[in-house]
Amino acid sequence: MDVIKLGGSLSRSDALVNCLDAVEKNYQGRAAVIVPGGGAFADQVRLAQQYWRFDDNTAHHMALLAMQQMALMFKGLKQDFVIAPTVAAIRDQLGRQKIVIWSPDISELDKAGIRASWDITSDSLAAWLAKTLSATELILIKSAAIDAGFSLHQLSEQDIVDKAFCDFVAEAAFTTRVINAQSCGG
């Protein structure tokens, strides 16, 4: 089973539909979970927090709602995909041979002890989910140019993956790839 994180910035171009189409084509009858980035919805949370200066825990919960909004948008684009909010619901849908879109449950992540910080974005949450589900591979699809020679630490230093990502994938049993959305074709 693979976990595929689609960066929120993909929603600003046709790359999003191309990547969703590629997942649909490549994962027919295979287990896959899509993790949506927060996109413009998360950007609005950042702006609101800067302006209103509310705490990181509130911003973290609002950013999770941003991911939930993107999950709904993905479902609107791919009616045959299913949305699942919890690890148990994901496992149930994967057993039914469905491509699953994760709409993260705030209370489940709070219980897991996920720290409220902008250093932890949907990248790290995808890694947490991949580890929790015992995924084979985690694929992060980004709109940014990806230097294939860069390590995950270098990608973090370049702000291509979040600051906490390397900690979340440390000692992971799954492989990790970070690729540009142009790899989806279209």
Image (cartoon, helix red, strand yellow):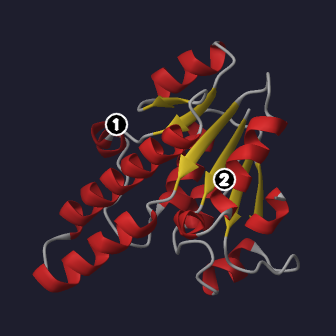
Which residue position holds label 1?
Answer: 108
Q: In the picture provided, is 20 more to the left or to the right than 47?
A: right
Using the rendered image of the protein, determine whether residue 173 is visible from the camera's viewpoint.
Answer: no
In the displayed structure, would residue 26 be above or below residue 56?
A: above
Question: Within 10 angstroms of label 1, few (less than 14), some, or many (20 or more) residues?
Answer: few
Which residue position holds label 2?
Answer: 17
Q: Tag 1: residue type?
A: Glu
Query: Residue 13: x, y in percent?
Result: 61, 68
Quarter of the picture containing the C terminus is bottom right
Query: Residue 150: x, y in percent?
Result: 81, 80
Q: In the picture provided, is 9 more to the left or to the right than 14?
A: left
Q: Nearer the viewer, residue 145 or 170?
A: 145
Using the rendered image of the protein, determine whether residue 65 is visible from the camera's viewpoint.
Answer: yes
Q: Tag 2: residue type?
A: Val
Going 62% across and 66% down the picture, which residue do you hit? 166
Tags 1 and 2 touching, CB below 8 Å: no
